[in-house]
Amino acid sequence: MNSTPLPHGVVAGAAIGIGTGRSRKFVGDEHGADVSYFYVENQPGEGPGLHWHPYSETWVVLEGTARVTIGEETFDAKAGDTATGPAYVPHCFTNVGDGLLRIIGIHASATIIQTFLDED
């Protein structure tokens, strides 16, 4: 099978995959970009533990429902919703729906810096 090389600046999903699933981690600094992101597919009950970054993070819910905590506030975000957590404020999200949660976490940084507050 012939494949055409990707144009400069395009990164194949397989090159930034996390584990065996479809989740991906894009570190902008590795690709000449000023932002980074996680594309995540979580099953019900899954999500990252409480953590913070020295920059803001914006989440775009593509599918499903995420229970998002930013500081002292907790709310449900559904497909089509966008939320932003400010720098240094602890945050997390969990898939509270019955099906797959697809979400993008955009980091306002060319590198990803995370400090987790719990052991998980």
Image (cartoon, rainbow, N blue to C red):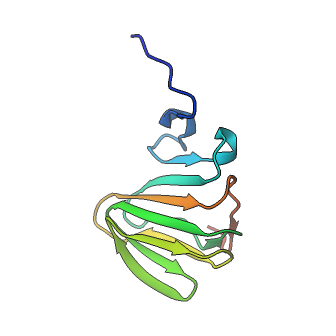
Q: Which residue is drawn at 50% across and 19% down?
A: 5
| In the image, farthest residue toward the top | 1
| Observer able to see residue 29 | yes
Q: Position of residue 23 (x, y in %)?
A: 48, 48
Where, quadrant-wise, is the N terminus in this rendering? top left
Q: Where is residue 51 in the image (x, y as percent from the top left)?
A: 63, 71
Q: Which residue is drawn at 52% across and 34% down?
A: 10
Image vertical order of residue 16 relative to residue 119, above or below: above
Is residue 63 rendered to the left or right of residue 2? left
Is residue 35 rendered to the left or right of residue 80? right
Quadrant position of residue 87: bottom right
Q: Where is residue 41 in the image (x, y as percent from the top left)?
A: 42, 54
Image vertical order of residue 85 relative to residue 22, above or below: below
Image vertical order of residue 2 relative to residue 106, above or below: above
Image vertical order of residue 78 relative to residue 43, above or below: below
Q: Residue at x 44, y 44 (%)?
A: 22
Is residue 102 rendered to the left or right of residue 86? left
Q: Which residue is drawn at 54% across and 65% down?
A: 48
